[in-house]
């Protein structure tokens, strides 16, 4: 009897161990890093310290990194981060943040070169993990989910219905920080979402995004903390437990999310267009991110999306031709003499027959082409080595991530001149006025260069650091002064001849958007926070201001006046018309929740507008 009892007990013990194994098979722990900011003081050594802590703890199954890898988005900062993160002994998954995109020297291509993608998805212990980029290359500091990534998300989760829960990772909070956040929650609600994890705020706390439990984590860097650190996430008994780990190695619990709660996630209306005081003539949807605004030449509309496709549309919105530039296009094309020219951030400059879309010539550079392209009728004395069958005078002027400004002959793609005065990326659309080129760069300076020779005439600076550079704003002029705005929230008038400050003002919360009246007497300022200002170009004094309640908006746009009305769009997708004489304002059109580029006039009452989601419309005002 005793022997039988002992054998039975062994079976029971084995059975209990088997049951325990089933019960806890889903339990695991991972490291969560965010806001590394390589380039900030000691950020590299602090990241290295965190990697060592993770490697010394075998209980971590993997690591997730949620953005702001670099401080200024520079290629060498990303490379340093990559070199350190590659020391992790177990897998890691990574997405970028706004610091990696706003000032990216490569238009985010360096990030994807290092990590192969700017998003991720993987499965672990019956759970689905998905991460998307919410940073916007160059166009403002807020968040946006690209249309092609929303399609990818839906298709990815369609194949994940049998997973226990889905965990979604993003850099920005999934709220108004991302202009089209609700398009993400509308997708997640269909696929058994468990939690959203984000960074950006450098604060650890549990919260809720449209009914979805969420957590945001501290930054890796020690700024504002006693030491560097990260979050540990443990999935145990259908609960996510969060704790902070720093160099003391004493975990501090800071929150938990139950994975068994019944979620109520409202479906948010995602109307694509609403007309208030305009008539939409046609719409075209590229279904891919558009970084630059459209370009109108010879009664045709040209555009280029981030995938590298260059399009030509007629005035009815029909596709005439498309051309693959075989790279990522973030610069607005330009044209002259029936030659369209486009550039990629990989460094290719291509000429295309503007009527047929046929390729003409392509040359490459060792650095990305980052500025908008502008054409210029050359008036210098350059002797060209290559034959010029048509003897055209047209050239193209553009800047690169290395700070070089170039002028190239449009017919032969032979270099006319180069200027290397700038020591930072040139992003803006250079202004050509009276045979001079005016532009800012991400080195804090603003430049005036001779358009015939490329020689520097003057360089201006008002003490602003890198973050306050006059680099994204498109300058305007009345023939006497150059007018710019900067992220320092200042408006400047700079003497065109001498490069000296005539006046400056910080009362308008300006950012990187400015326009000028056709008469040259008034400036138009879109502030970063709710307001639109009309001010005197001569003195900088206010003329009229409007509280349009569009929220925080850092999208750089040009503002154009036709007749008495000024037109511009906002990050929320609204287009406004401001009467410069009657001082009235009205919302005329909503294009969907995505940043709108500069509005382009076709005639006095007809305009072309586009947004970052790839939508292009032609509309007529009533």
Image: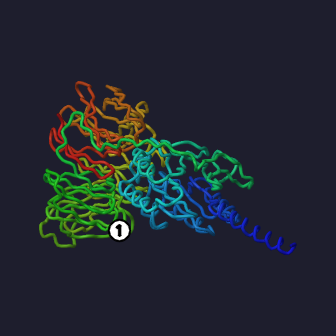
Residue 341 rendering spot, x and y as whole percentages: 24, 61
Note whether residue 525 is visible: yes
User: What is the tally of numbered marks visible in this picture?
Assistant: 1
Q: Rate crowding at label 1 as few (under 14), some (14 to 19) or many (20 or more) other CA atoms within 10 Å.
A: few
Above or below, 212 against 57 in this view is above
Residue 273 rendering spot, x and y as whole percentages: 27, 42
Name the image colouring: rainbow
- Residue at the image point whose x is 61% and y is 46% from the top: 204
Q: Image quadrant of residue 268?
A: top left
Residue 492 rendering spot, x and y as whole percentages: 38, 37
In the shown orientation, is residue 301 left or right of residue 66? left
Note whether residue 480 is visible: no
In the shown orientation, is residue 209 left or right of residue 48? left
Q: Nearer the viewer, residue 515 or 431?
A: 515
Considering every residue shown, the one lying at the far left of the view is 390
The residue pinned by badge 1 equals 365
- Residue at the image point whose x is 69% and y is 48% from the top: 253
Q: Nearer the viewer, residue 102 or 419?
A: 102
The quadrant in which the N terminus is found is bottom right
Residue 198 rendering spot, x and y as whole percentages: 53, 50
Q: Image quadrant of residue 424?
A: bottom left
Considering every residue shown, the one lying at the far right of the view is 2
At numbered mark 1, what does the secondary structure look like: helix, strand or loop? loop
Q: Image quadrant of residue 38?
A: bottom right
Above or below, 357 against 556 in this view is below
Above or below, 418 against 562 in this view is below
The quadrant in which the C terminus is found is top left
């Amino acid at each position: 009897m005793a022997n039988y009892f002992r054998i039975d007990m062994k079976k029971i013990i084995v059975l209990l161990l088997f049951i325990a194994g089933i019960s806890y098979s889903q339990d695991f722990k991972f490291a969560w890093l965010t806001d590394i900011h390589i380039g900030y003081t000691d950020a590299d050594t602090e990241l290295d310290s965190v990697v060592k802590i993770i490697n010394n703890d075998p209980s971590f199954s993997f690591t997730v990194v949620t953005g702001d890898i670099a401080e200024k988005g520079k290629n060498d900062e990303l490379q340093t981060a990559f070199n350190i993160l590659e020391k992790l002994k177990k897998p890691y998954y990574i997405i970028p943040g706004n610091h990696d995109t706003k000032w990216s020297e490569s238009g985010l291509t360096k990030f994807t070169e290092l990590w192969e993608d700017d998003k991720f998805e993987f499965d672990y212990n019956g759970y689905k993990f998905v991460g998307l980029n919410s940073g916007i290359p160059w166009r403002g500091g807020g968040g946006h989910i690209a249309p092609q990534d929303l399609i990818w998300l839906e298709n990815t989760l369609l194949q994940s219905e049998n997973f226990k829960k889905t965990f979604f990772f993003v850099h920005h909070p999934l709220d108004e920080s991302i202009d089209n956040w609700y398009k993400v929650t509308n997708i997640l609600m269909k696929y058994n979402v468990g939690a959203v994890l984000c960074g950006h705020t450098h604060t650890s706390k549990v919260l809720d995004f449209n009914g979805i439990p969420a957590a945001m984590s501290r930054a890796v860097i020690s700024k504002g903390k006693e030491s560097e650190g990260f979050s540990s996430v443990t999935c145990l008994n259908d609960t996510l437990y969060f704790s902070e780990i720093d160099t003391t190695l004493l975990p501090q619990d800071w929150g938990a999310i139950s994975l068994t709660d019944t979620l109520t996630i409202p479906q948010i209306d995602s109307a694509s267009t609403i007309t208030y005081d305009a008539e939409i003539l046609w719409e075209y949807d590229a279904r891919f991110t558009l970084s630059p605004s459209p370009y109108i030449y010879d009664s045709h509309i040209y555009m280029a999306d981030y995938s590298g496709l260059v399009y030509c549309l007629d005035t009815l919105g029909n596709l005439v031709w498309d051309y693959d530039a075989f790279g990522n296009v973030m610069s607005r094309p330009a044209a002259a003499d029936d030659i369209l020219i486009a550039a990629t951030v990989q460094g290719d400059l291509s000429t295309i027959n503007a009527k047929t879309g046929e390729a003409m010539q392509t040359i490459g550079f060792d650095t990305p082409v980052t500025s908008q392209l502008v054409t210029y009728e050359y008036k210098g004395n350059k002797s060209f080595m290559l034959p010029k069958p048509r003897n055209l005078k047209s050239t193209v002027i553009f800047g690169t991530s290395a700070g070089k400004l170039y002028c190239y002959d449009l017919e032969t793609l032979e270099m006319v001149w180069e200027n290397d005065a700038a020591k930072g990326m040139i992003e803006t659309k250079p202004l050509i006025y009276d045979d001079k080129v005016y532009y800012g760069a991400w080195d804090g300076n603003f430049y005036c260069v001779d358009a015939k020779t490329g020689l520097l005439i003057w360089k201006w600076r008002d003490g602003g650091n890198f973050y306050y550079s006059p680099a994204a704003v498109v300058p305007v002029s009345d023939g006497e002064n150059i007018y710019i705005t900067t992220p320092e929230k200042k408006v400047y008038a700079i003497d065109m001849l001498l490069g000296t400050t005539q006046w400056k003002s910080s009362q308008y919360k300006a950012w990187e958007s400015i326009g000028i009246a056709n008469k040259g007497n008034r400036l138009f300022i879109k502030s970063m926070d709710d307001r639109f200002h009309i001010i005197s170009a001569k003195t900088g004094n206010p003329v009229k201001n409007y509280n349009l309640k569009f929220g925080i908006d850092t999208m750089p746009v040009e503002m154009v006046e036709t007749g008495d009305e000024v037109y511009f769009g906002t990050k929320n997708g609204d287009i406004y018309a401001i009467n410069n004489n009657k001082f009235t304002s009205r919302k005329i059109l909503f294009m969907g929740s995505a940043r709108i580029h500069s509005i382009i006039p076709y005639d006095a009452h007809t305009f072309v507008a586009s947004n970052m989601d790839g939508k292009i419309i032609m509309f007529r005002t009533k």
